[in-house]
Amino acid sequence: MKRALITGITGQDGLYLSELLLSKGYEVYGLIRGQNNPKAELVRSVVPDVKLLNGDITDLSSLIRAFSEAQPDEVYNLGAISFVAYSWENARLTSDVTGIGVLNVLEATRLYAGQDLSKVRFYQASSSEMFGKVQDVPQRESTLLWPRSPYGVAKVYGHYMTINYRESYGMHASSGILFNHESPRRGPEFVTRKITQAVARIALGLQDGIALGNLDAKRDWGFAGDYVEAMWLMLQQEQADDYVVATGETHSIREFLEVAFAHVGIDDWEGKVTQDPRFFRPAEVDLLIGDPTKAREQLGWQPKVGFDDLVRMMLDSDLAQQKELAGR
Ligand code: NDP
Ligand code: GDR
């Protein structure tokens, strides 16, 4: 039985990845931080077979303890401060967690492997935010990185550190440059879930409108359940490498709103959406669209859920959730 250690277990991807690995017969360990993390209950209810270990990716000794307990064959480093807008307000903290945290997990992996680096494989959750002010359309593995936020800069550090551990020590360390991926488990601070939650409430007569920032930004949105499969596939390859994981399609926030409101039968939605300067960013990433050719050809990976189905899946889930809340 293979053993996996996942950081960021309480997040969207941590849950989907746990489900995938458990379905493949893995013994799964999840690193959980804080003295009474409120999301521990969620993990225990969704994936009760995951074994939780205390630790924080900013604390190397806690990682060393977790590694010694989990004895992993595969390490998935998903832990991060992942909300781009928050990263301007907490740039130093974001650098410590999202940047230096990667170095800590790499170092814990190296120390745990000792002389036998072949005993463990490492995955880093890199991001399309590293492309920022895009230098190619679509963006691929070779595209010059030009991050536009403290979060993006921290991810670039983690990305190159992962490559450096691969090149310096021969570690099986791969970096997945994942474009935005969403699901009913997406945090409500991200624009997709913020919209589907609000549209569900508007449809049910529970609220009148929604305040957003820039509606013209374009993102390459896929389904998180598909994307965790790409993570796993990367660690099954003989050679570690870096891969863009994306759908190859891009849509604006406005188009997302269009599909969401149409799904609940509202056509005249423009009056329900206001633009609020609070939600604009100091520097925006205007256009992201990934070229997933390498992932398709080398990993055999393809996304299964398309844009319209993703919006509808999230909205249906929020409609059910909001109805239940309203009925209480
Ligand atoms: P989430 O924000 O849902 O989850 C982030 C996770 O990181 C949480 O489990 C959080 O735990 C954990 N975490 C935060 N700080 C620490 C810390 N100091 N030590 C250990 N764990 C910590 O993110 P997603 O699941 O969406 O994303 C997973 C990873 O993939 C992240 O690294 C993200 O940056 C990256 N990524 C995500 C993309 C996406 O579209 N979703 C695209 C590209 C990259 P806690 O409960 O303690 O807060
Ligand atoms: P992003 O996701 O920054 O791409 O990072 P987010 O959903 O926060 O923003 C996407 C785009 O929507 C615009 N936007 C708004 N965003 C939010 N959150 N709230 C609003 O009200 C709003 N109005 C407009 C933003 O300006 C932006 O252009 C996500 C995270 O998961 C990262 O961790 C990950 O690395 C990248 O995706 C790929």
Image (cartoon, rainbow, N blue to C red):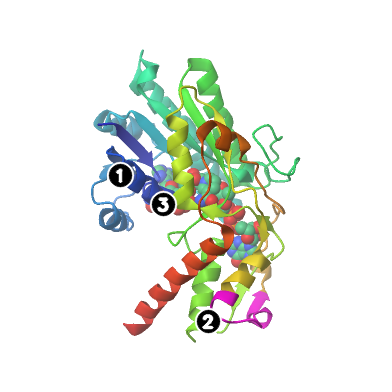
Residue 271 within the magenta-colored segment of the rendering: yes
Q: Which residues are magenta?
A: 262-274
Up-down relation of residue 326 to residue 291 (above or below): below
The location of residue 169, given as percent across then percent down, is: 48, 16
Pointers 1 and 2 in contact (CB under 8 A)?
no
Of 255 and 5, nearer the camera is 255
> Which badge, 3 or 2, comes first in the chain's sequence?
3
Which kind of residue does numbered mark 2 sit on?
A: Ile
Callout count: 3
**Residue indicated by mark 2:** 202
Of 173 and 302, nearer the camera is 302
- Gap between marks 1 and 2 measured at Cα: 37 Å
Residue 315 as seen in the image, left or right of residue 276: left
Q: Residue at x 32, y 58 (%)?
A: 38
Please identify the quarter of the rendering in which residue 208 is found. bottom right
The location of residue 77, given as percent across then percent down, is: 43, 38
Circle nearer the viewer, 1 or 2: 1
- Secondary structure of the residue carrying tag 1 is helix
Instruction: Check mark 3 vs ligand 1: CB closer than 8 Å? yes or no.
Output: yes
> Which badge, 3 or 1, comes first in the chain's sequence?
3
Which kind of residue does numbered mark 3 sit on?
A: Gly
**Residue indicated by mark 1:** 23
Which kind of residue does numbered mark 1 sit on?
A: Ser
Q: Is residue 84 visible?
A: no
Q: Residue at x 57, y 51 (%)?
A: 180
The location of residue 101, given as percent across then percent down, is: 47, 36
Q: Which mark is residue 200?
A: none
**Residue indicated by mark 3:** 11
Residue 99 as seen in the image, left or right of residue 217: left
Q: Residue at x 33, y 28 (%)?
A: 73
| Other-residue count near label 2 (Cα within 10 Å), few / some / many at <14 / 14–19 / ≥20 | some
Circle nearer the viewer, 3 or 2: 2
